[in-house]
Amino acid sequence: MGKVYLTGAGPGDIELLTIKALRVVQEADVIIYDRLANPDILKEAKDGCEFIYVGKEDGRHTLPQDQINEVIYNSALKHDVVVRLKGGDPLVFGRGGEEGKYLYERGIEFEFIPGITSAVSVPAYAGIPVTHRGVAVSFRVVTGHETPNKETSQVDWESLGSDETIVFLMGLHNLKNIAKNLIRVGREASTPCAVISRGTTKEQKTVVGTLEDIYMKVKEEKLPTPALIVVGKVVRLRNELAWFGEDSNP
Ligand code: SAH
């Protein structure tokens, strides 16, 4: 029986892959990968390495999680080094915990290899620090995938009214509701807000607005996924701190 490496691929920029992740990719007999993992990483694999795509998009699974678990398990029965490559960090909305549990229950050895999460690095590439002295002393990463409906939502909307940075992942399709709800729980309508699409890649695009107008602005721009939402005063720092790609002055 082989060993499974539940590995973070980083947010997109291939250079944000960790040295440890690169090592297991180079040693892998099979790599099971997501849509969010930069496919250029696969070029680092050795000859004869098998690639299995189990892509997911914004929580819509092309392969259901239980089948992904099985693919990983069956690979571990056949191969020595199995790399499960996931966008960002495997344990930040990455279901790496579920995959680890599944392997634990079947006696398969595994390891987590953390990755650079999009939640922090994508704002960084847009010139937005998630914390900043005197501006934000805390930040929260929240799923934007849930409908903010009181009966069913597990997100504690009432607690999001305070003045901290919030990063919503998987929230592009829900942007209108998210902005509306933040205003409902006490955020000023003028609170700065940014939506960053395809962060850390050549196609990075950032739209800045306020809770009041961000939805319309993003709609006009037709931003593609993956995209995340940053809410809070730190967004204003982008005026001085934007440095990457779309913003850089040659
Ligand atoms: N485990 C991942 C997150 C998985 S949830 C991580 O740690 O980054 C998928 C969500 O992450 C997307 O819906 C989007 O909100 C965000 N995301 C991932 N990569 C991104 C990127 N390059 N640019 C913008 N958002 C990204």
Image (cartoon, rainbow, N blue to C red):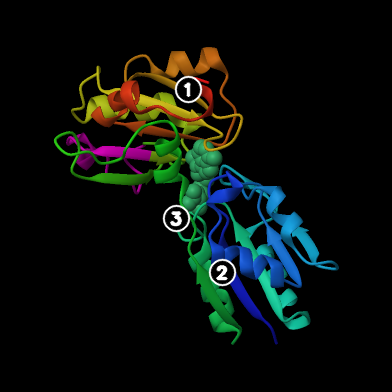
Q: Looking at numbered disc 3 in the image, what kind of residue is underneath it?
A: Val
Which residue in the protein does label 2 denote? 99
Asked whether the viewer can see residue 62, the reply is no
Percent position (x, y) of residue 100? 53, 73
- Residue 52: give x, y in percent of width and height: 76, 60
Q: Quickly name the residue at label 3.
A: 92
Determine which of the numbered discs, if any, sits on residue 247 in the image: 1
- Give 31 or 121, whichever is nearer the viewer: 121
Tell me the quarter of the picture where residue 104 sits.
bottom right
The amino acid marked with disc number 2 is Glu
Camera-side mark, 1 or 3: 1
Residue at 37% across, 30% down? 178
Residue 52, relative to residue 11: is it above or below?
Answer: below
- Decide which of tag 2 and tag 3 comes sooner along the chain: 3
Outermost residue on the right side: it is: 48
What is the residue that sits farthest to the left in this orientation? Answer: 134
Is residue 106 highlighted in magenta?
Answer: no
Residue range (magenta): 149-167
